[in-house]
Amino acid sequence: MSGGNTSAPVASTFAWLADLPSLPSRSKVRCLGHIVEYDLKGSCALLEHTYPTSADITRIWLDVNLVLESTDRLVLQPGNWINVIGYVQNPAPAHLQKSSLAVKSTVSTTSLQAILVWDAGSIHLEEYERTMEEHKRVQREVKTVRRAQCS
């Protein structure tokens, strides 16, 4: 290999659901969400996670078309907490905005195209949120140090 060219996939970055509307389309993210509803016909789920607590309730569409065959249907049951790696779609595709769930809910116009979904299990939510806040703080510090080194 020469000159830094690589064919490795782009790594995902952690994001809260509340962050997704501010991210550019096609950003690859990993996030945690609670399934509020699942639309079998539209192959989409309505995800929610009210964090940070100062944020309004954030609900986004999760398009699971690409992972339906590899995801256990029990993982997509309402009430489950799931981890998702996917790509931000801003605005959400029209077929998601026209989902039967759209009639019932106020949802962000942002969606997430899932490329990997797995059950979060019996998550300790407060501990998870605290750990991820620490992770984000460390990532910000690393970026600051790198910028200072490049200057």
Image (tube, rainbow, N blue to C red):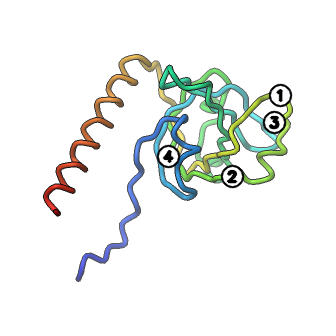
Label 3 element class: helix
In 3D space, how far apart are the residues under numbered discs 1 and 3 (Cα atoms)? 5 Å
Measured as percent of width and height from the top left, residue 46 is found at: 69, 33
Among the two numbered marks 2 and 3 on one chain, the one whose residue lies closer to the N terminus: 2
The residue identified by callout 1 is 104
Contact, mark 2 vs mark 1 (Cβ under 8 Å): no
Q: Residues within 10 Å of mark 1 (few under 14, many from 20)?
A: few
Among the two numbered marks 4 and 1 on one chain, the one whose residue lies closer to the N terminus: 4
Measured as percent of width and height from the top left, residue 110 is found at: 65, 45
Q: Residues within 10 Å of mark 2 (few under 14, many from 20)?
A: some
Among the two numbered marks 2 and 1 on one chain, the one whose residue lies closer to the N terminus: 2
In 3D space, how far apart are the residues under numbered discs 4 and 1 (Cα atoms)? 26 Å
Among the two numbered marks 4 and 2 on one chain, the one whose residue lies closer to the N terminus: 4
Q: Residues within 10 Å of mark 3 (few under 14, many from 20)?
A: few
In the picture, residue 137 is in which quadrant? top left
Going by the image, does 113 lie left or right of 4? right
Give the amino acid at mark 3.
Ala
The residue identified by callout 4 is 85
The residue identified by callout 3 is 102
Q: Nearer the viewer, mark 3 or mark 4?
A: 3
Measured as percent of width and height from the top left, residue 14 is found at: 41, 42
- What quarter of the picture does the N terminus occupy? bottom left
- Any mark on residue 91, and which? 2
In 3D space, how far apart are the residues under numbered discs 2 and 1 (Cα atoms)? 19 Å
Q: Residues within 10 Å of mark 4 (few under 14, many from 20)?
A: many
In 3D space, how far apart are the residues under numbered discs 4 and 2 (Cα atoms)? 18 Å
In 3D space, how far apart are the residues under numbered discs 2 and 3 (Cα atoms)? 14 Å
Label 4 element class: strand
In percent of the image, x 50 and y 33: which residue is there?
32
In 3D space, how far apart are the residues under numbered discs 3 and 4 (Cα atoms)? 23 Å
Image vertical order of residue 41 relative to residue 128, above or below: below
In percent of the image, x 60 and y 25: which residue is there?
56
